[in-house]
Amino acid sequence: MSYLHRNRLALAATGILVLVLALIAADLPASLRVWSLRSMGTTQLETLVRRNPEDLEARYQLGLTYARGNRHVEATREFLSVLARDPARHEVLNDLGASYLLQERYYEALVALQGALLAKPDSAVAYANLGRLHLATRMPFTAVRELEKSVQLDGRKATVHCDLGEAYQRTLNVNGALRSYQRAIQVDPKNLQARVGLGKAYFSLTRYQEAEAEFKRALEIDPSYASALLSLGRMKLEQGVTRADWEAAQPLLTRAAELDPADPEARFDLGRVHLRLKQPDRAVEHLVRALQLSPEHPGATHQLSRALRLAGREADADRVERTFREMALNTREESRLEERVHQQPNDWNSLAKLAGLYIRSGKTSLAALMCQRLEHGAPGHEQLPALNSALRQAAARAEVYRKQPSGAGPSSRAESGTAGL
């Protein structure tokens, strides 16, 4: 190569470098401001927004700060304010959808997340949140497709692999769940959700030693991780054949119930332990609490009738058994209607019936989703006024109950593109 040719190449490379540096420099002030806003506290951002309500980046960062503090109503307000002036920001649409999801406002979450994907069709985080939404609304096959797409676009997040594992479990694809949890652990070996999920998958495959090892690894990382304690206690209960086996499960389940008072499953399993130990009064206490936390829990209803009968409370047992039979029928009808609505989304009569069943079983968030779909698709449907009235009454009763002191509330997962919600 001649000296002149090498010199021309060097000059061309220098020109490209200068152009790249110029482009970076042009964007540097905006990037520095975003960094500066992210470093501010809630009070500083609130002051900034009060002084200049048109500062969209400040409002967005304030919304993210509210979201990180579980102040989702305020976060929603700020995200909507930004979108009113800049409606195509995909990251704000995603964060709005995540905030709605955490408030169990499922229809609004769906609209926002679909908007995020219209604005950015390759948004891995929006696909992940859509998958979580469909897990929450009992559509696991749809969730599998969306979470698979998220992983294809970006496989670096252990939480998404975990959610895909959960979706596979719900569709009875245990081997798929196993692979997803293993990938999550490859990404983050200390991810507790992945360890427990992997243990559950092993347990479903009757690989009991490997299951126990994963639960114990999770507890080595965090001895107070309630899900690992519950899973290990449940495994000991399921495998137990002697009084000593069941007594070994009891402290694990008791600790899980103490650490997560809002989880009905630990109470349910404690009820089962006391039934096997022939302690019906203790069993009744735990099973009643499980039903207070989850009124539609069919397993707890069935076990409660057994405990009451063992305690000699025949009339109460008969009444609970009638409730259990009614719940079993409702559950089968719900499953049938869910499948029909999934296959035929415009079957408004089936959708209205499903909304009514959800209301009667206390699933107000799912009922609200059905009613909103009905309002948008068939606003003149004859059952809609009665459904909305029943939904308002059920939601009011649920709000009164939620205000009773009962420990930590239920947790949900959603993900923001920048805040990691």
Image (spheres, rainbow, N blue to C red):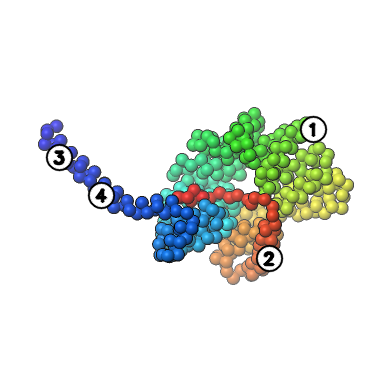
Amino acid residing under circle 2: Gln
N-terminal of the two: label 3 or label 2? 3
Q: Nearer the viewer, mark 3 or mark 4?
A: 4
Residue under pointer 2 = 393
Amino acid residing under circle 3: Arg
The kind of secondary structure element at disc 3 is: helix
Distance from label 1 to label 3 (Cα)? 86 Å
Residue under pointer 4 = 22
User: Could you tell me which residue is drawn at 65 percent across and 65 percent down?
Assistant: 392
Amino acid residing under circle 4: Ala
Residue under pointer 3 = 8
Q: Nearer the viewer, mark 4 or mark 1?
A: 4
Residue under pointer 1 = 243
N-terminal of the two: label 2 or label 4? 4
N-terminal of the two: label 3 or label 4? 3
Q: How packed is label 3: few (under 14 Cα within 10 Å), some, or many (20 or more)?
A: few
